[in-house]
Image: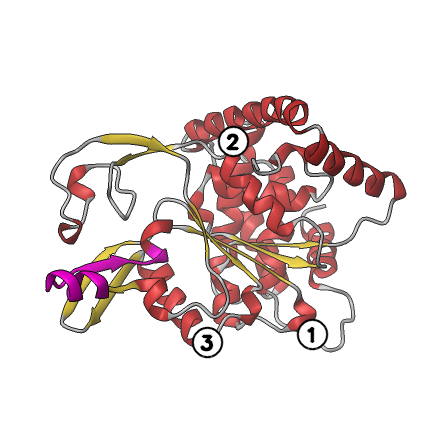
């Protein structure tokens, strides 16, 4: 069945905004979605695949390369037949083996033809797209280490069984999970550009609207999709326009000072907080059609960019989102 339309997801505005920002500027570095089960986390990621603009890629390239020159030699691609495909969104299941993630020797080809060939893994399939990990906080440590290495370099390197393979692996990481079931290692947590928290809706009208749309999706599918796919098409056009405008968004010294001031007040480690906040605010400005980043864009982007970068304060019972809001009110009144 066609994925549930992104525009038809009820509420969860911060989650949808974070995903739209990474679609405008993948350099923001991905989205971490933490919250209750059954709140639309996986549905939103599936819907994102249908929403995103398609990409041009060389037919048959396991890494979704845009040109023949970008295709790795081991893929054996000789003709630059360019085709249009949906933006890849690849699921990484829990318990996945390292070979399936990175790729490995093609055993079938080795046994039947006596050839040593490489079988690409999930990282190759996710190149130029999204890599989605449900229950990311339960991911095994050695897979986390592997992801950290690839996220840092943007390249997957496989050195084993006489193979020496490398290929580009630039993707937006989307992770979801329930914090009550396990914490995420700080190194991986810091790799996510944005973090959002979702919860079950408390308003009865919202819950009714969720049921109404889900029922229409399952029982009046054609009409429901016809309506919401038009909404998705409008949103896709907005994302494309924002991508085109992104480089032209002006960043004043005041905006830079505001980003640094907020991070300093929050005690954010390193400088990744400032850089991510600036990138998210710029994408937000482009999406709004603004020529320059304003304090309003920074205020809106700060909770998503900073709440997962704060040190724990055992004397402060408020959540990290409340701490960010408190500092924003003081630093950027």
Locate residue 298: give its quadrant: top right
Judging depth in this view, the residue of 325 and 153 nearest the camera is 153
Sequence-wise, the earlier of marks 3 and 1 is 3
Where is residue 332 shown, x and y percent of the image?
Answer: 67, 47
Disc 3 from disc 1: Cα separation: 26 Å
Residue 118 forms part of the magenta stretch: yes
Where is residue 122 shown, x and y percent of the image?
Answer: 37, 57
Q: Name the residue under label 1.
A: 313
**Label 2 packing within 10 angstroms: few (<14), some (14-19), many (20+):** many
Q: Which of marks 3 and 1 is in front?
A: 3
Residue at 64%, 46% in the rendered image: 15
The quadrant the N terminus occupies is top right
Q: Mark 2 points at which residue?
A: 286
Disc 3 from disc 2: Cα separation: 37 Å
Tell me if label 3 and label 2 are in contact, CB under 8 Å: no
Which range is magenta? 107-123
Residue at 43%, 44% in the rendered image: 26
Tell me the element at label 3: helix
Locate residue 208: give its quadrant: top right
Tell me if label 3 and label 1 are in contact, CB under 8 Å: no
Q: In this view, does 110 lie above or below 285?
A: below
Residue 268 forms part of the magenta stretch: no
Where is residue 98 shown, x and y percent of the image?
Answer: 36, 70
Q: Name the residue under label 3.
A: 141
Sequence-wise, the earlier of marks 1 and 2 is 2
Disc 1 from disc 2: Cα separation: 35 Å
Judging depth in this view, the residue of 111 and 118 nearest the camera is 111
Residue 200 is tagged as: none
């Amino acid at each position: 069945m066609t994925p549930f339309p992104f525009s038809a997801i009820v509420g969860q505005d911060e989650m949808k905004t974070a995903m739209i920002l990474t679609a405008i500027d993948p350099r923001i570095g991905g989205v971490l979605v933490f919250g209750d089960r059954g709140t639309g986390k996986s549905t939103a990621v599936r819907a994102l695949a249908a929403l995103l603009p398609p990409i041009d890629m060389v037919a048959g390239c396991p890494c979704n390369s845009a040109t023949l020159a970008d295709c790795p030699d081991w893929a054996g691609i000789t003709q630059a037949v360019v085709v249009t495909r949906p933006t890849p969104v690849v699921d990484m299941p829990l318990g996945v083996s390292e070979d399936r993630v990175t790729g490995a020797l093609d055993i079938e080809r080795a046994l039947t033809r006596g050839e040593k060939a490489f079988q690409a893994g999930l990282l190759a399939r996710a190149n130029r797209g999204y890599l989605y990990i449900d229950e990311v906080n339960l991911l095994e440590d050695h897979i986390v280490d592997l992801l950290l290495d690839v996220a840092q370099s943007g390249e997957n390197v496989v050195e084993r069984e006489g193979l020496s393979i490398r290929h580009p692996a630039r993707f937006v990481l989307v992770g979801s999970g329930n914090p009550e079931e396990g914490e995420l290692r700080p190194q991986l947590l810091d790799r996510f550009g944005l973090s959002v928290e979702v919860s079950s809706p408390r308003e009865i009208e919202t819950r009714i609207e969720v049921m109404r749309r889900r029922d229409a999706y399952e029982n009046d599918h054609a009409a429901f999709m016809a309506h919401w796919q038009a909404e998705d098409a409008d949103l896709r056009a907005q994302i494309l326009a924002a991508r085109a405008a992104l480089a032209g968004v002006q960043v004043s010294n005041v905006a830079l000072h505001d980003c640094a001031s907020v991070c300093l007040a929050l005690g954010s480690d390193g400088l990744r907080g400032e850089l991510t906040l600036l990138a998210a605010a710029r994408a937000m400005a482009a999406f709004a059609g603004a020529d320059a980043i304003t304090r309003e864009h920074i205020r809106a982007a700060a909770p998503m960019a900073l709440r997962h970068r704060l040190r724990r304060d055992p004397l402060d019972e408020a959540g990290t989102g409340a701490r960010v809001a408190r500092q924003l009110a003081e630093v950027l009144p």
